[in-house]
Image (tube, helix red, strand yellow):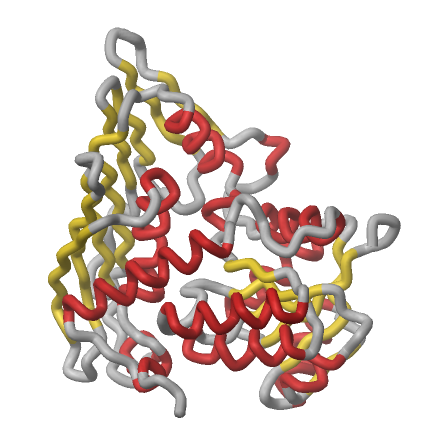
Amino acid sequence: MAERNVRWGILATGGIAASFAAALVDLPDAEIAAVASRTEESARAFAERFGIPRAYGDWESLARDEDIDVVYVATPHSAHRAAAGLCLAAGRNVLCEKAFTLNAREAGELVALAREHGRFLMEAMWMYCNPLVRRLKALVDDGAIGDVRTVQADFGLAGPFPPAHRLRDPALGGGALLDLGVYPVSFAHLLLGEPTALDARAVLAPEGVDLQTGALLSWDGGALASVHCSIVGGTAVAASVTGSQGRIDIPDGFFNPERFVLHRDGRDAEEFVLDAADGPRNTLRHEAAEVMRALRAGEQESPLVPLSGTLAVMRTLDTIRERIGVRYPGDAVAA
């Protein structure tokens, strides 16, 4: 693999799959070898759009394709356990969209499968691979703002989404939390790790999913994080990290920023902007590049998006859903 392109399979053909395929096209050492959907018609249309040589009308054929190095799973999160599990059991490496699964139990099952078969597995938390987010974390870890005291992050869409939309369907893991809230929760985890306690409140839809959720996370060291998500109001999608000696503000698009501002006590504010060499802001290519780097290095997980962190985020999301009273059909333990 070190001397040839990394061959990708794409499982699902929706909007995020198309965005990821476009990112792969921009990477000179990536090759999209095959795509799969539940219908051959959808797979063929996607293949024609991106010049993909093989199109499958079922997931199993993609999972069995030995000329694929890694599969990108882009289904709704309610199908992540089944789709990613199928690929891992067939010996494929997997990059799986977020939220990683419906719940921590399913996430643990995927991690166990990956380890059993000796396969690479990573959550597609592209925020962690963003060069500016990595720079921000390095500054925080190096003590640029002292000890972290508070983290604030929000992600809201204006909507409205009709009752038939997937975001309001419990069977598809609908609601604001898993689709949008995973970003502010993951941002807090990135800087502070897994919280020791939390409380949460939500406004629920008649279908039983959350329309908007707010949570307060706390850590034994005294840090707090306030996170919010919504599918009924467009927010600034901003984040702020406050420490004992300063603050870092991401004024918009915190999960994929083009700039942030560092405020340090007794110093002028410093602005950090996305380097032109890193490419356009709205790209998934950084996480694809990280997957390919890890595969070529023989790693079974990424240090940027470790599986232990993914499992911790899923435990936090489970606890928030328990507090707000949101349950999915997939939460039931399989017999």
Q: Is residue 257 left or right of residue 48?
A: left
Quick check: 172 above or below 246? below
Viewer-side residue, 4 vs 196:
196
- The location of residue 82, given as percent across then percent down, is 52, 81
Farthest top residue?
A: 266
Quadrant into which the N terminus falls: bottom right
Tally of marks = 0
Quadrant into which the C terminus falls: bottom left
Q: Residue at x 25, y 7 (%)?
A: 266
- The location of residue 317, given as percent across then percent down, is 29, 62
Quick check: 94 above or below 163? above
Viewer-side residue, 170 vs 299:
299
Q: Is residue 298 left or right of residue 121?
A: right
Q: Is residue 200 left or right of residue 290?
A: left
Viewer-side residue, 34 vs 4:
4
Q: Residue at x 77, y 57 (%)?
A: 6
- The location of residue 97, given as percent across then percent down, is 50, 64
- The location of residue 61, given as percent across then percent down, is 71, 85
Q: Is residue 268 left or right of residue 205?
A: right
Farthest front residue?
A: 116
Farthest bottom residue?
A: 335
Q: Residue at x 51, y 41 (%)?
A: 130
Viewer-side residue, 76 vs 283:
76
